[in-house]
Structure formats: C-alpha cells, structure tokens
Image (tube, coloured by chain):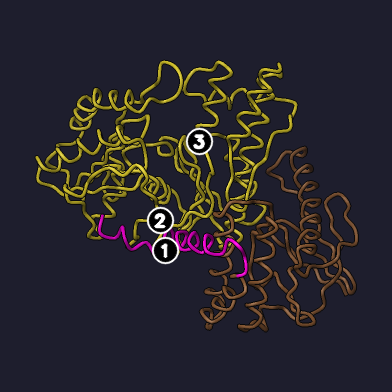
Chain colours: A brown, B yellow
Amino acid sequence: MVKTVLGGEAEVRIHEMFVEKERISKRYRIRELDDRLRKKRTTSEAKIISAARRAGVPTPIILDVEDCKIVMERIDGEAVRNVINREIAVKIGKNVAKLHSAGIVHGDLTPMNMILKNDLVYFVDFGLAYYDERIEAKGIDIHVFYEALKADFDNWDELWDGFLKGYSRYEKFDEVIDRFREIEMRGRYVEKSENSQ
Amino acid sequence: MISLGIESTAWNFSVGVVSEDEVIALEGEAYSPKEGGIHPREAAQHHSEVAGKILSRIFRKISPDEIDVFSFSQGPGMGPCLRVGATVARALALKLEKPLVGVNHCLAHVEIGKWLTEAKDPVTLYVSGGNSQIIARRGRRYRVFGETLDIGIGNAIDKLARYMGLKHPGGPKIEKLAEKGTGYIEMPYVVKGMDFSFSGIVTHAMKLFDEGYRAEDIAFSFQETAFAMLVEVTERAMAYLDRNECLLVGGVGANRRLQEMLRLMCHDRNADFHAPPSEYMGDNGAMIAYTGLVMLKHGIRTEVQNSQVRPDFRIEEVEILW
C-alpha cells in the first residue's frame, strides 16, 4: 500500500521499499521559474542528502533523481517523535554538529523529520536544507529545534539538555550558542526593552 | 477617543487623525530626491519645512483641543527624519497637555492592516523601501519569521529603476514596464531558510541592462523572481504556523502583480488574502494614530524623557497587550 503525504513544497509517496518525493508546481510562479526552482532544488536536496551521509549523518540512500522527483530508500523504523528521550536527543545533537561542520544548515530540524532505526537517528527530510557558513543560520537552525521541543514535549528541557550535550562537539558550539541566546532575546523574551515604552 | 499620529520615518511626512471607528483626516507630503536615493538630512529638511503647513491642514478639519493623544513613529527609520516627527509630537503633547505615545513603525503597518481588513491573526508580508519582513503574532509578541538579509525590496526596485533612467518613484514605473515584458530572463533566486536577499538580483538586472536586454523584460523578470521569493517564504510561514490568513502591507504592497501572486498562493492553500486600501499601505500618519490609540487604551504612554527616536527599533521588542 502506498501512503501519500502532502507537504508544503512536495508530495511524498511512501512505498514498501522506497519513498518518492516530488516537488509540486506553484501557480503563483511563472512556468520557467517554477520548473527551474523545482529541478534545482531536487538536485540540490539529493546532493545534500549524500553530503550529509558522507559527513556521518544517517540518511536514506538515494536511488534515483529525475526532474523534480527523488526516489530514496525507505527507512522503516520508529518516528523519533514517538520515542524521543534524552539519549536520542544526544544523538540528534551529534548529527546536527556533523551537518554544521560540513557547512550544511538543515532548515527544518524537528523530531517529525527523523526516524530511529537500529539505534541510529536518520534525518530523512532535507527539503529546506542549504549550505551556509554563517553563525546566524546555524543559530536559527538549532532555535527551530528548540521551539519544536518546547511546543511538543513536557520534558523538553531534559531533551534540550541532551541535544546540547551531543551538539557540543561542534567546533563553533560556543559561538552558535551565544547567537542562539541572542535570537531568543529578539523573540518573545525581550525583557530589557519593557521599560522603554 | 481621538488620536493624532505623525509618520516621518523616511520619505513621507504624514499626519493622520483617527477615532476608534474611522480615519478622520490624513494629510501628508512626500519628499522626492532630485537625483539618487533618499538623503536622510535632505528628507528631514523637507519634513521640517512642510510640517507646519500639514498640521494646519489637519487642524482645519479637527480642532487641536479634540485630540486625546499624540503619537509618533519612534522607529525603525532614518534618525534625522524620525527626529522631526518626534519633535513635533512632543511639542503638541506638552503644549496641549495630552499623552504622548511612541509607536513602532512596523507594528503600525500591521495594526492598520488588520483594522481596515477582516484579517484576525494573519501572517503579514510587510514590504517597503527599507523593510521586507514576514511577521506573525505569537503570544504577546509579533515575531519576524523571515526577512531580507540586505536591502528592502522597495530599495531594490528603486535602485534598478534609477539605473534604467526612470525617475523617482521607481516602483510604479517598473510595474508598468513589467506588464509589457514577454521574455523571462533567469535571475538569481536567493532564499536561505526563511530569509532572502535582493542585492544580487539588482546587480544582475543592472548588468543585463548594460548588455542591452529590453527594459520591459528585465522589469518583468526582476518582479517575477523577487516577488516569488517573498511569496514562497510567506507561504512557508503560513504552513509552519498553520495560519489561513495572509495580510499584505507596506508601500510595495500596491504592486498588482505581487497582490495577484499572493492571492493565487492563498487560493491554492484555502487561505484568505487581505490588503488594506493602497493609501494605507505605504507609510501614513493614520497607522501611527491608530496604533497609538490602541496602545494608550492599554495603558501605554511614553514620557517625554523616554521619547528619543530609535532607528533600530524592532517589532519583537513591543509587548502586545491587546
């Protein structure tokens, strides 16, 4: 049986042995641009999935890339969202450290995009990933994960602590964490300006 | 309650008066550079020259004694320009012994957009000369989910327009040219996560102009590419936040092609598209007046000693009590 998931950007068809991910056309874009973006992003995603693998992050093996479609191995494990604990969060942190070391920003780090199989945490969706050396981009990357944990799990602080333990092996850990705090300040928790109204 | 608001962030000096229900008066004059972009000091000079005249036009429609609160745009914006509006507002508030409220300019765009449309809790695309942001409320703050990494879309359009020999303001002229464009020329499309960048596409478009491509095709391709970047990130924010309303504000929001693209995007994801009337899209005093009124009703006022302008004032810094 084929299960179909419609995301914001792509349609994902999950077969028994493999997964097809096809980028859908957007009517608001003119055809030339739409075609170009979908093709380019499909190629780029496939490349980043492979690059992430080479950097040591478990990812599905790419079986085929055609036009706007990627065919990849199906990772048949447990949704990380359903099984996450501190130990798994440490593994996620280690994965992200490897990605960032390789200059890859994931763009959508949430437990929804991860699968646990044979004790390995697979990152299965690189649809919004891109190369970026800026500390800012990495700070935002982990901030997205932080927000996802806070929104979804009661024991988020324990999970976040585990994530940081794994992520701390990244050589620019301190810089990214400083930036992360700054990003946090820019957001909801700006206390310093409260008096200036 | 009646509120008077002064907007002098950049090119426009505008004064608006609103009640809880309607806009009572709106008067303003735009500074137009003789050549090149906006010179902050020249613009500020312009604002101080026209301020008196515009206020007397306003006070012919409503007596100063009827006004309950004086609001001004406190930032973000160009320091010298902001200072003119702040000075006028302080003088009026002190003289008439009424409260003063310093308003965040970006917040005012969002608030008047919501006031004049049916939007309740939208993802807002705010596009102007200096700013390009995707904003949505979360809890007691507005948050910026994506924004330009370099220049605002309006500045990008103006730069290209000037380079192609079009007079200020360039936006409507580029839009007109684009309507006659027929061939799409590939341009850099730069979206990084939720952020985007326009400086590369401007440089590229200028180069194409030097190489002799048709101005119509350049304008068309530029708009199609740059606007697609904005619409894409707006859609992504809507998906992420699970919102089904989109609000377009800011001067560039008057562009009909941008509106059409957002409308299509919204239609395809079963969401509603909202845009206020175009006179309230660009910088205007009514948005400052309205936001000041809402703030005062929630007990927020600005003491004169704390009313210094804030050129880097961010929308996230304001706690939303309403």
Crowding at label 3, few (<14), some or many (≥20) Cα neighbours within 10 Å? many
- Residue that numbered label 1 is attached to: A188
Q: Secondary structure at mark 1?
A: loop
Whether residue B242 is situated above or below residue A159 in the rendered picture: above
Could you say which is closer to the camera, residue B270 or residue A156?
A: A156
Point 59% across, 24% down: residue: B176
Crowding at label 2, few (<14), some or many (≥20) Cα neighbours within 10 Å? many
Q: Are marks 2 and 3 in contact (CB under 8 Å)?
A: no
Whether residue B204 is situated above or below residue A87 in the rendered picture: above
- Amino acid beneath label 3: Val
Distance of mark 2 from mark 3, alpha carbons? 22 Å
- Residue that numbered label 2 is attached to: B316
Q: Secondary structure at mark 3?
A: helix
Q: Is residue A35 left or right of residue A100?
A: right
Q: Are marks 1 and 2 in contact (CB under 8 Å)?
A: yes
Could you say which is closer to the camera, residue A132 or residue A29?
A: A132
Residue A4 seen by the camera: yes
Q: Is residue B91 left or right of residue A50?
A: left
Crowding at label 1, few (<14), some or many (≥20) Cα neighbours within 10 Å? some
- Amino acid beneath label 2: Glu
> In the rendered structure, which segment of residues is drawn in magenta?
A169-197
Chain letter of mark 3 equals B
Residue B9 x %, y %: 34, 36
Point 17% across, 51% down: residue: B303
Q: Secondary structure at mark 2?
A: helix
